[in-house]
Amino acid sequence: MRKIFLWIVRIGSFILLVGFIAITSGRDPISQSDGPIDVTIPGESINEAGWLSFLNETDSNYEPRFDSQLTPTPVYGTTVESSPVERSNDSNQSENDSGLSASSNLDIYAFHQEENNPQNNFSDADNQTSPGGEAALDAGEICINGPVDGTFVKADELPESSIAAFMDEVTELGMHIIIIQNTRTKGANCNSQNCCSMTNYSWLPGLPEKLGLILEEAAKREVEVYVGLVMTAQGICPAAYYVNPNSSLTIEDTSQTVRIIEEQYGQHPAFTGWYIPDEPFLTGWRVPKNIYDYFGGLVYAIREYSDKPILVSPHLCQSQRRTPEEISRRAKTFKESTGIDILLWQDSVGTGAVDIGWGRYESTLDQHFAALSDSLGEDALWAVNELFNCCTSDILVPGGGAYRPAAITRFALQLTMTAPVSRRVVWIKQHHLGLVDPYHHSEAARMIAAFKAYFGISGEYLIPRSYQWLTPPNYEYADSGNELFDLRTGDPIDFQNETWVGIEGKGPQSVELEVDFGESRSIDWIGLHLLQKEDAGIRFPSQMGIACYTDSLQWPIITSWSLPSWIDNQDGEYVFSNLEPLGEHCQSVRLWADNWWWTFISEVEIISSAQD
C-alpha cells in the first residue's frame, strides 16, 4: 500500500508540475490551425557583403547578414507581423505582443522572395563563392589560409598510422598550425585528496617518441607545431594547481621536460613553440598572486633551455561578471608579470554560453576581443573558437549538454566576433571536425561538409527560395520571418529568446515544414538546430526524416533517422542531422520530426557536397 501511495503522490506531483510550467512559461494551451505558413528568404545575397569584410566588424550591435524583416504577403488567413516576436511569460499575451491573436484562424502565410534576386542558395552562379569564402576549390586541392589557422591536438589519442592522414585533413581545411595539448600528465590513479601532492609525473602514451613523426609530417606540409607540456589543472588538482606542492613540482617537471624535448627535437624546422596546458582563470572575482608566480615560474623553466614562443590559454567563462575593460587589464598584467608571449583566449561559447548577440548580457564576445586586442595587441592575442554545442548553464565545463559538433552558422559568428586577433585555432578538430581520429563524433561528417561549403572550400551551403510551415508554430514562439535561414542560432540557455521557433508536441510528425529551392538541387546533409530544456517541457525530437519532390506529384520518403542514443538528457543545443550523406536531388524537401514534447528550432542547415 505504501508503494501505491507513493506512486499516486509522484503522478499527482508530475501533473501539478506540468501545469505550473505551462502557466509560468507563458505557453497558451489554445491550439493553432493545422494550416501551413509560407516564409520567403530575403533577397540580399551573402556575396554582397562578403565573409572577409564581415570578419572585421566588431560592433556590439550585431545585425544578421540577411535582412530579417520580411514583408508578408498573405495567401489567405491572418497576416503575421514581420518584426521579431517579443517573448513573454504572460499567458494572456495580446495580439500586439505576439503578432498573432490566439483566436486567429491561421491557415497559410506566404513570404515570397524578391524578384530581382532569384538565387536560392549562397553560391553565385558566376564565381561559385560560398557565404564565408572565396571561389570554391577543385576536388583534392588544398585550401591555403582558410578561416581557421589551426587546431589543438590530443597526440596520445592519435595513432601513429593516422598522423599523415590527420595532417592532410588539417591542411585540406586551410589550417597550418597544430598545438599538442600536453605531452605529460600527473597523478595517475589518484583521487581529489592527494592528486596535487603526488609526484608521479609521466609521459602520455606514445610520447615523446611520437613527436618525431608528428614533426616530420608537419614539416612536409609547412605546418607549425607548438608542443604542450604537463597538465595538472584539468581534473587533477583544479582547486589548487597554482600553489605548492603542485606549483613547485610542476615547474621542476616542466624544466626537465623542456630539456629532453629541446635536446631531441629543438632544431626541427616544424617545432615552432611551447604551450602551457594549465589554463589561468582571469575572469573570477580576483586573480590570486599565486597564479602570476606559478605561470612566471613555468616561463622561467622553459627559458632555461629554449627561446621559442610560449602560449597559454585563458577562458571567458563567467566573463559576464567582469567588464571587457577589466578582463583586458588583467590579461595585460598577467602577460607582463609572467613573460608569456601569446594568450590564446577561449571564446567559451561552447563551455560558458558567452553572448554572441542574443542580448543576454551587457558584454558580448566581440566587445571582449576588441578590448583584449587594444590591451595586448593583435600579435599577442589568438582566439580559441569552440566547435562543440552548449550547454546546461553559463558556468560549466566541456561535456555539458550535447557535446557534439555545433551548427556551422554559430561557429561562423564566433569567428566574426573574434576578429581582432592574429590567429584562430579550434577546440577540437579531432572530435568535431575530423574523421581520421578514432574518437571523432559521428556528427563530425556533417560539420566538415558544412565547413567546406560555408567557407568556399567545396560544395554549397544551400538557402531555399522559400519555406512553408505545415505544422504552424505556437503564436508565442512564432516564426517572425526567415528565422530558420537567417544564419543565427538560438540562445542555448534562454528558450524565451526570439531566436527560437516553438512547435507544440503532438506525437508523430508534430513538426513538418517544406523548403522549396525552385529547381532541382543536390542535397547531402540536412540538420535542425534544436534546444532541450526539460523543466520547460522542451526536448529533442525522437525521430526526423525527409521526403523529396522532384518533377512528379509524389513525395516519396527518402529516409528517416532516430535521435542517437549517445545524446544525453542534459539541457543544451544540438544539431540533429543525418549521419551519412543523402546523395539526393530535390526541388523541394519536406522535413518532419516526431515529438510528444515541445520542439524548439532556430536554424536549418542544408548542404550539398557537390558543386551544382
Image (cartoon, rainbow, N blue to C red):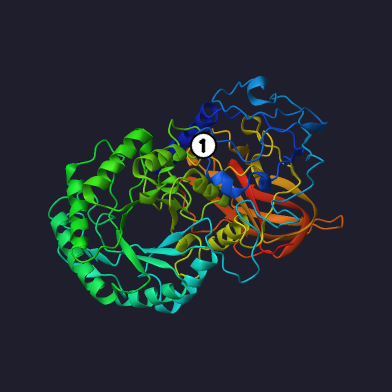
Does residue 145 appear to the left or right of 111 in the view shown?
left
Position in image of residue 539 (x %, y %): 54, 45
For residue 549, say whether it is visible: yes
Q: Residue furthest bottom?
A: 161
User: 168 or 480: which is nearer to us?
Assistant: 168
User: 501 or 221: which is nearer to us?
Assistant: 221
Does residue 553 appear to the left or right of 121 in the view shown?
right
Position in image of residue 386 (x %, y %): 45, 52
Q: Dividing the image into 4 quarters, which one contains the N terminus?
A: top left
Position in image of residue 83 (x %, y %): 66, 28
The quadrant in which residue 586 appears is: bottom right
Q: Dividing the image into 4 quarters, which one contains the C terminus?
A: bottom right
User: 144 or 89: which is nearer to us?
Assistant: 144
Q: Residue furthest right?
A: 552
Residue under numbered circle 1: 357
Q: Is residue 187 shown above or below 515? A: below
User: 554 or 305: which is nearer to us?
Assistant: 305
Figure label count: 1
Position in image of residue 136 (x %, y %): 65, 61
Q: Secondary structure at mark 1?
A: loop
Judge the density around disc 1: few (<14), some (14-19), many (≥20) Cα neighbours within 10 Å.
many
Residue drawn at x 43%, y 76% as measured from the top left: 217
For residue 509, say whether it is visible: no
- What's the residue type where badge 1 is placed? Gly
Q: Is residue 176 shown above or below 341? A: below
Does residue 486 appear to the left or right of 333 in the view shown?
right
